[in-house]
Image: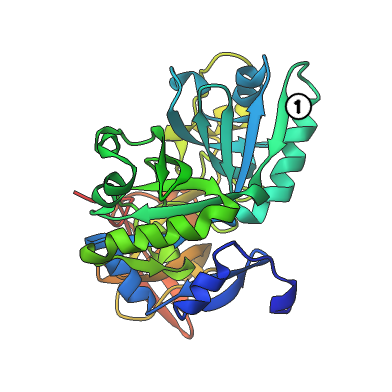
């Protein structure tokens, strides 16, 4: 696919001005890095980084049955959003338990905002429309093309956003939602992220994204802010033990198998898709489970590399890289449950060698 055929975010020209290396990601021409993945990763862990994630999808759900409809679609319990301006992480699950996508749901004053993965926008939009037919009063709106999304992540994220949006930002709890004006642009934001650090994901009209991007970079200059690409986003989320759709999650993998049982509420009221299969897995009928592996040496595990117990292949790596902040090679993999106990010694096939690896606690990195 040539660059001319790729979709671009409203900030593509800003990325080019900053010298970003652009790559094809899910049909989008996106920055993979600016200075280097290591520089950007460390900036987010120790200072602050700014990501353009405008390729993500946004759906708005309204109507008298909006709550009932979203509750039916997701594995988490929407009743946990007991008042407006709250958010939760969840998944769309198929009847057989496989994951359609993982997403964040925001409860706002008059609607629900669903933020889905860029690679799944069309599939997810078809999915929600298909199931909306079962409800009499539900209205769906896909605002993905009209919405830009920036992620401000790292220890100084709160100070920077507060300087632009107002001091109330400092009092927001994790997974809450607020609205403000930045450089004359109306924005909204959740105290959420995909890096393992504190921070915000900030929504704005697509045609105003450049103003907000530059305002954040300017406000963050004294804090050492770095514009960050998808390369660092991937290494950061992997250290934080967060799944990436198409790697740790897919249509043949349930949230239970992916170790996301904390975000699945099987006892919630009403029917919802995938409950029966996931209940069976919780009751012991699970054939695979995700583990975090700490590998020895310097060779890096990558997606698809085999995982062994002795001479027998028992699974495969779903994601792997250097743990840039923790300082050793890391990987996620699926293995049979009997090989998932913490401390279990396994190995990863890297080139012509079996590199020793140990099952360790998830996540690899957790901020203090």
Q: Say whether residue 24 is visible.
A: yes
Q: Nearer the viewer, residue 125 or 287?
A: 125
353 vs 127: above or below: below
Please state if 31 lies on the left or on the right of 345 as rendered. right
Which residue has dot 1 on it? 132
Side (left or right) of 285 relative to 63: left
Farthest front residue?
184
Q: Nearer the viewer, residue 79 or 330?
A: 79
Tell me if mark 1 has few (under 14), some (14-19) or many (20+) residues whose alpha carbon lies within 10 angstroms of its own: many
In front here: 121 or 111? 111
Front position in the image: 111 or 295: 111
- Vertical placement of 132 versus 13: above or below? above
Q: Considering the image in quadrants, where does the N terminus appear?
A: bottom right
Residue 99 picture quarter: top right
Question: What's the residue at 55%, 41% (across, down)?
Answer: 103
User: Quick one: which residue is furthest to the left in this view?
Assistant: 368
Q: Residue furthest bottom?
A: 352
Indicate whether 109 appears above or below 48.
above
x and y percentages locating residue 24 in the rendered image: 63, 72
Query: Which residue is at 57% across, 28% downward?
Result: 112
The answer to whether one can see residue 276 in this image is no
Q: Is residue 204 above or below residue 300?
A: above
Number of numbered tags placed on the structure image: 1
């Amino acid at each position: 696919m040539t660059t001319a055929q790729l979709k671009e975010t409203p900030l593509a020209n800003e990325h080019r001005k900053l010298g970003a290396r652009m790559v094809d990601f899910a049909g989008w021409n996106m920055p993979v890095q600016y200075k280097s993945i290591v520089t950007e990763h460390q900036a987010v862990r120790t200072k602050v980084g700014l990501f353009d994630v405008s390729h993500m999808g946004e759906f708005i759900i309204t109507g008298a049955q909006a709550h009932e409809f979203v509750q039916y679609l997701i594995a988490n319990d929407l009743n946990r959003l007991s008042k407006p301006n709250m958010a939760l992480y969840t998944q769309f699950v198929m009847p057989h338990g496989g994951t359609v996508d993982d997403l964040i749901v925001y409860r706002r004053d008059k609607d629900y905002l669903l933020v889905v993965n860029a690679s799944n926008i069309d599939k997810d939009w078809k999915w929600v429309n298909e199931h909306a037919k079962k409800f009499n009063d539900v209205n769906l709106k896909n605002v993905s093309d009209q919405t830009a999304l920036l992620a401000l992540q790292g220890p100084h994220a709160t100070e920077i956003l507060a300087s632009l949006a107002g001091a109330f930002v400092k009092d927001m709890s994790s997974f809450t939602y607020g609205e403000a004006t930045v450089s004359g642009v109306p924005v909204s934001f959740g105290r959420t992220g995909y890096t393992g650090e504190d921070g915000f994901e900030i929504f704005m009209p697509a045609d105003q994204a450049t103003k907000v991007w530059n305002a954040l970079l300017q406000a963050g200059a004294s804090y050492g802010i770095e514009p960050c690409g998808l390369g660092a986003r991937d290494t950061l989320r992997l250290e934080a033990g967060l799944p990436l759709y198409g790697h740790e999650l897919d249509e043949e993998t349930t949230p239970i198998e992916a170790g996301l049982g904390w975000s699945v509420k099987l006892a919630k009221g009403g029917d919802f898709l995938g409950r029966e299969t996931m209940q069976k897995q919780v009751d012991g009928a699970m054939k695979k489970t995700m583990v975090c592996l700490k590998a020895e040496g310097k060779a890096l595990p990558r997606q698809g590399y085999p995982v062994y117990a002795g001479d027998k292949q028992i699974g495969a790596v779903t994601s792997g890289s250097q743990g840039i902040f923790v300082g050793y090679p890391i990987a996620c993999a699926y293995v049979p449950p009997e090989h998932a106990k913490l401390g279990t010694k396994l190995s990863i096939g890297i080139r012509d060698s079996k590199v020793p690896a140990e099952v360790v606690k998830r996540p690899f990195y957790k901020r203090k």
